[in-house]
Image (tube, rainbow, N blue to C red):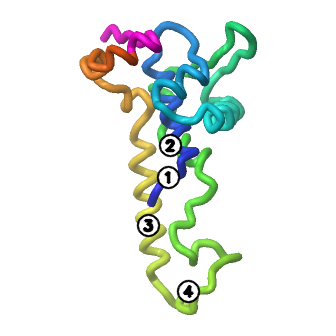
């Protein structure tokens, strides 16, 4: 299974905000840190705010921050909210399924079990679990200076 870029960027935003200890972050700041499109992040941030994962503030001094502590944001919840579907094979979608084996095939149940295991694994972790070791963050000194990341663990 491969997550969409949208989900990838959503997780990156939440990880970044989990590392950010000195206030709010901006879309431009996060896009610069990761070297990704600001335009893509605008949609991601809007959705994350609608889903209640982050708070946003418009205006000159605006930005975003996590809506709750990183320990309280489960990765499985984020993935479920950001992935359009979990149709890992054609037979998972009744509208597009044209497989002649579908009525008697047992592969779908095996793939479904694997999909459930994938999500169960993600449910065991939260954003705090993804935050890099402070020594690694220190090794990103140029980026640290750019965004003001400081961890005091």
Left or right placement of residue 106 versus residue 41 in this view: left
Q: Secondary structure at mark 3?
A: helix
Which quadrant would residue 96 be assigned to in this image?
bottom right
Residue drawn at x 51%, y 29% is 14
Looking at the rendering, the stretch of residues picked out in magenta corresponds to 144-153
Residue drawn at x 51%, y 67% is 88
**Residue denoted by label 3:** 113
**Residue denoted by label 1:** 3
Q: Secondary structure at mark 4?
A: loop
Circle 3 crowding by C-alpha within 10 Å: few under 14, some 14–19, many from 20: few
Nearer to us: label 2 or label 3: 2
- Residue 152 vs 87, above or below: the answer is above
Circle 4 crowding by C-alpha within 10 Å: few under 14, some 14–19, many from 20: some
Circle 2 crowding by C-alpha within 10 Å: few under 14, some 14–19, many from 20: some
Q: Earlier in the sequence, mark 3 or mark 1?
A: 1
Image coordinates for residue 2, horizontal then vertical, percent = 46, 57
- Tell me the distance, in whole angstroms, between the alpha carbons under discs 1 and 4: 25 Å
Image coordinates for residue 102, horizontal then vertical, percent = 55, 86
Q: Is residue 85 magenta?
A: no
Q: Closer to the camera, 124 or 101?
A: 101
- Residue 137 vs 51, above or below: the answer is above
Left or right placement of residue 112 versus residue 54 in this view: left
- Residue 114 vs 33, above or below: the answer is below
Find out whether the residues at labels 1 and 2 contact each other: C-beta distance under 8 Å: yes
Q: Closer to the camera, 20 or 33?
A: 33
Q: Earlier in the sequence, mark 4 or mark 3?
A: 4
**Residue denoted by label 2:** 8
């Amino acid at each position: 299974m491969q997550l969409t870029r949208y989900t990838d960027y959503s997780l990156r935003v939440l990880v970044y905000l989990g590392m950010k200890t000195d206030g709010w972050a901006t879309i431009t700041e996060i896009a610069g840190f990761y070297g990704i499109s600001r335009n893509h992040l605008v949609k991601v941030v809007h959705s994350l705010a609608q889903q209640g994962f982050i708070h946003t503030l418009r205006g000159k001094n605006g930005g975003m921050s996590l809506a709750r502590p990183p320990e309280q944001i489960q990765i499985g919840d984020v993935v479920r909210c950001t992935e359009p579907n979990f149709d890992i094979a054609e037979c998972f979608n009744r509208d597009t399924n044209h497989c002649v084996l579908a009525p008697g095939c047992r592969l779908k149940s095996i793939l479904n079990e694997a999909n459930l295991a994938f999500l169960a694994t993600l449910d065991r972790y939260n954003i705090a679990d993804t935050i890099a070791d402070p020594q690694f963050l220190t090794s990103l000194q140029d980026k640290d200076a750019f965004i003001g990341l400081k961890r005091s663990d």
